[in-house]
């Protein structure tokens, strides 16, 4: 005759199954279309023997190149939680990438707005002000410095 299954056995088995099921959950690559994917992840590339420490430090401090930011649009940098826009040629702005409505990360920059996927809030690329609710507060400004072709957070 078998023994009845205890609550402890069920919980332990469930926990083990969950742990096995989650192995590699964060390793899946996002294969979004480059035409619509404006979010950028900045994971440093492996350094080679020919890279000088000064050049490596410069690369690590650089958020983007000016050529990376489309005129009239922008790019989202998820790791830094910042979005950089270029409302007019040569004019660069930076804002928090966290929506002021409920804290979601904005997902795209298109048609002159920074768009939040959670509830549809949109913000102007020119000043971060609300273009369409439900958000009522603008995106907070972030300080950047443009030197030559380099854009850095300050």
Image (tube, grey):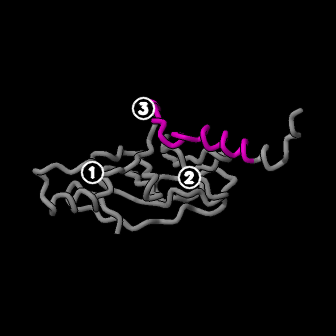
Q: Mark 1, mark 2: which one is toward the viewer? A: 2
Callout 3 crowding tier (Cα within 10 Å): few <14, some 14–19, many ≥20? few
> Residue 99 got which mark?
none
- 41 relative to 28, above or below: below
Q: Which mark is residue 35?
A: 3
Q: Quadrant of the C terminus?
A: bottom left
Within the magenta stretch, is there residue 19? yes
Q: What residue sits 51% from the left and 58% below the top?
A: 128
Q: Is residue 87 magenta?
A: no
Q: Nearer the viewer, residue 125 or 34?
A: 34
Q: Is residue 55 left or right of residue 35?
A: left
Query: In this picture, which residue range is highlighted in magenta?
Result: 12-33
Q: CA distance from mark 1 to mark 3?
A: 18 Å
Distance of label 1 from label 2 (alpha carbons): 22 Å
Furthest residue toward left: 50
Q: Secondary structure at mark 2?
A: loop
Provide the residue designation for mark 2.
Answer: 105
Horizontal placement of 62 versus 105: left or right? left
Where is residue 72, by image quadrant?
top left
> Which quadrant is home to the N terminus?
top right
First in sequence, mark 1 or 3: give its number: 3
- Sequence order check, earlier mark of 3 and 2: 3
Is residue 124 found left or right of 152 in the rendered image? Answer: right
């Amino acid at each position: 005759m078998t023994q009845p299954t205890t609550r402890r056995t069920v919980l332990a088995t469930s926990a083990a199954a969950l742990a096995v099921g989650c192995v590699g959950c964060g390793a899946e690559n996002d294969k979004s279309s480059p035409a619509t994917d404006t979010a950028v992840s900045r994971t440093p590339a492996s350094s080679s023997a020919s890279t000088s420490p000064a050049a490596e430090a410069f690369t690590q401090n650089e958020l983007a190149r000016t050529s990376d930011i489309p005129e009239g649009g922008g790019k989202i940098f998820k790791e830094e939680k910042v979005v950089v826009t270029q409302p007019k040629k040569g004019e660069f702005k930076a804002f928090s990438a966290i929506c002021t409505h409920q804290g979601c990360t904005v997902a795209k920059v298109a048609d002159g707005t920074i768009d939040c996927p959670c509830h549809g809030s949109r913000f102007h690329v020119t000043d971060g002000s609300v273009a369409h609710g439900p958000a009522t507060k603008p995106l907070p400004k972030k300080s950047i410095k443009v030197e030559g072709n380099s854009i850095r957070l300050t």
